[in-house]
């Protein structure tokens, strides 16, 4: 068989413009030069909003671990009136010796948006509980109790010169209605 290929080499070279390598490349599987689709501006905006929402939740959880109303992540992710409310609640908790332990895991989507504001709905797994810092015991009478559960969260996000930030939030403890 090898001898047949040797005999065909001059013919193949003529057919392929004098280069066997060039001929072989014609039979190589085509390489994909297709580009990945470029995300549309609305998709990018939704992604930015959801990233900012997730950052705001993480900032709140972090500040709650020590009830630090001055945590720099809060103003980086939140604006008034929500920022003032969160800071006031954290200050009250600190005075009472209360901190939080656990996490909040959002499953969010953008419900509506304009060029400068958006509403984010999230069915969030809330495993964050308030405890007394001195002994780690749960604070009695917590809304939703001390067992983890799902909460429906409706957050208004606004576009600031520094990016998207949370400006208002409403939490329905213990359930997520359809659409969340």
Image (tube, rainbow, N blue to C red):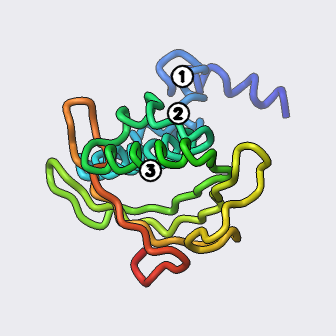
Residue that badge 2 annotates: 26
Name the residue located 14 percent from the left edge and 49 percent from the top edge.
Answer: 115
Q: What secondary structure is found at the residue carrying circle 2?
A: helix
Residue that badge 1 annotates: 22
- Tell whether 35 sits left or right of 138: left
Q: Are marks 1 and 3 in contact (CB under 8 Å)?
A: no
Q: Earlier in the sequence, mark 3 or mark 2?
A: 2
Residue 12 screen position, x and y as percent: 59, 26
How far is mark 3 from mark 2, CA to CA? 70 Å
Q: Extreme top residue here? A: 18
Residue that badge 3 annotates: 89
Q: Residues within 10 Å of mark 1 (few under 14, many from 20)?
A: few
Residue 65 screen position, x and y as percent: 62, 42
How far is mark 1 from mark 2, CA to CA? 7 Å
Q: What secondary structure is found at the residue carrying circle 3?
A: helix
Residue 95 screen position, x and y as percent: 54, 43
């Amino acid at each position: 068989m090898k001898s047949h290929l040797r005999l065909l080499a001059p013919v193949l070279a003529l057919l392929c413009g004098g280069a066997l390598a060039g001929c072989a490349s014609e039979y190589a599987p085509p390489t994909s030069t297709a580009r990945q689709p470029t995300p549309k501006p609305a998709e990018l905006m939704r992604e930015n909003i959801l990233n900012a929402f997730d950052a705001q939740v993480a900032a709140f959880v972090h500040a709650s671990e020590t009830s630090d109303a001055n945590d720099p992540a809060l103003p980086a992710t939140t604006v008034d009136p929500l920022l003032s409310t969160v800071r006031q609640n954290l200050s009250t908790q600190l005075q009472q010796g209360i901190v939080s332990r656990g996490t909040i895991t959002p499953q969010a989507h953008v419900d509506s948006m304009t060029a400068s504001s958006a509403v984010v709905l999230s069915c969030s797994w809330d495993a964050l509980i308030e405890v007394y810092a001195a002994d780690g015991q749960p604070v009695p009478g917590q809304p939703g109790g001390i067992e983890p559960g799902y909460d429906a969260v409706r957050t208004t996000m606004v576009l600031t010169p520094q990016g998207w930030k949370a400006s208002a939030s409403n939490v329905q403890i213990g359930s997520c209605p359809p659409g969340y």
